[in-house]
């Protein structure tokens, strides 16, 4: 045996001897199974979690989200909310308009009424105060544009018109000399010089009169028979509680002819009717009595022939 082989044999002998010393004595094989390893690891983790839970401060647990089915059952209805009016934001106070009027009707001279050249006539409009302020004598009827037909530049109101009340506004006019169709626009102005809007009027601001002037097919200046104006006068006797009103109407016509009429009352009743014969152009007066303890009533005189129209209103006031 060579010295090199002897050295290798001694080296392996020493290694085997040292390994034998580390082998366990009187003990069976203790090969650890995988299940035992996993069980020990789990116990170690559980012990560590328990220790951390005892040492860590209490933390609130958030509520669990509702299941999808529960959310669907408690969802609000999908109705569209009602929108607020665009011109009135929520919480905004609406300020009433002080001055505003509403056109009600043409009391006299319907549009297209025919007159002979130079014939005088009275145009009357009925308006309603739909504002919050009372109209008084500082308010005026004002010619605006178009054909003036001999009318005044302005006329002050003769009394007061409270909110919600109606009033008849009249102007005395004259048919122009030439054959044609004429139209004149009028407006209502307050004491401060501000024009009132007119609901239902022309362009929501004015009211007008329109007539046709004609002297006949032969070219002569023949005058048509017509009622050209009516004036009213009201007198009262007795007390307000038991008084009597006398309403007098003065009717003016353009030529000879017969006028038929009928009184109309504001309480819905119909007054007396009758007729007047005219021998030529001129005026006649008729009267009617009304016994009442009320105030603020009015009467209209309707001309059946030849005009087929109303000619103004007489108001019964008791101070």
Image: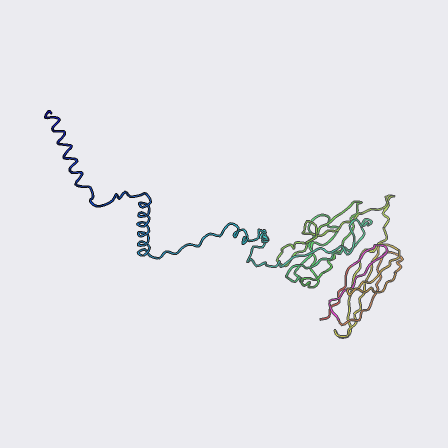
Residue 115 in the image, given as x and y percentages of width and height: 82, 50
In front of the other: 168 or 221: 168
- Between 155 and 258, the one lying in front of the other is 258
Residue 6 falls in image quadrant: top left
Residue 301 included in the magenta stretch of the image? yes
The magenta stretch spans residue 20:
no
Q: Seen from this angle, which residue lies furthest top?
A: 2
Q: The magenta stretch spans which residues?
A: 294-311
In the depicted view, which residue is nearer to us: 287 or 34? Answer: 34
Q: Which residue is at 31% across, 43% downward?
A: 33
Looking at the image, what colour scheme do you see? rainbow
Q: How many labels does the image show?
A: 0
Q: Quadrant of the C terminus?
A: bottom right
Main secondary-structure element of the magenta-colored stretch: strand
Residue visible at 20% across and 41% down in the picture: 23
Name the spot of residue 50 as percent of width and height, x first. Answer: 32, 54
The residue at 76%/49% (across/down) is 210
Q: Is residue 144 left or right of residue 267?
A: left
Residue furthest front in the image: 26
Quadrant where the image shows the N terminus: top left
Quadrant in the rendering for residue 228: bottom right
């Amino acid at each position: 045996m060579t010295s090199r082989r002897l050295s290798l044999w001694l080296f392996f002998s020493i290694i085997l001897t040292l390994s034998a010393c580390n082998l366990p004595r009187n003990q069976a094989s203790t090969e650890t199974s995988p299940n035992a390893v996993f069980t020990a690891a789990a116990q170690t983790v559980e012990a560590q979690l328990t220790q951390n839970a005892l040492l860590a401060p209490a933390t609130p647990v958030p509520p669990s989200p509702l299941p999808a089915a529960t959310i669907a059952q408690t969802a609000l209805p999908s109705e569209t909310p009602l929108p607020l009016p665009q011109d009135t934001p929520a919480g905004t106070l609406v300020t009433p308009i002080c001055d505003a009027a509403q056109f009600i009707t043409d009391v006299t001279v319907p549009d297209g009424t025919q007159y002979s050249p130079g014939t005088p006539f009275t145009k009357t409009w009925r308006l309603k105060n739909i504002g919050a302020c009372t109209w008084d004598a500082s308010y005026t009827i004002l010619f605006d544009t178009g054909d003036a037909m001999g009318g005044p530049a302005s006329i002050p109101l003769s009394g007061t018109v409270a909110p919600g009340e109606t009033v008849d506004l009249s102007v005395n006019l004259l048919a122009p000399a030439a054959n044609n169709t004429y139209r004149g626009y009028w407006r209502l102005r307050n004491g401060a010089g501000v024009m009132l809007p007119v609901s239902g009027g022309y362009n929501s601001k004015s009211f007008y009169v329109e007539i046709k002037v004609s002297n006949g097919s032969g070219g002569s200046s023949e005058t048509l028979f017509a009622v050209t104006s009516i004036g009213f006068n009201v007198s009262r006797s007795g007390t307000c509680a038991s008084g009597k009103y006398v309403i007098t109407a003065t009717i003016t016509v353009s030529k000879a002819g017969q006028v038929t009429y009928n009184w109309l009352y504001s309480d819905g009743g119909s007054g007396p009717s009758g007729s007047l014969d005219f021998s030529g152009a001129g005026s006649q007066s008729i009267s009617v009595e009304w016994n009442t303890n009320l105030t603020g009533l009015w009467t209209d005189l309707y001309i059946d022939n030849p005009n087929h129209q109303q000619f103004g209103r007489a108001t019964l006031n008791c101070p």
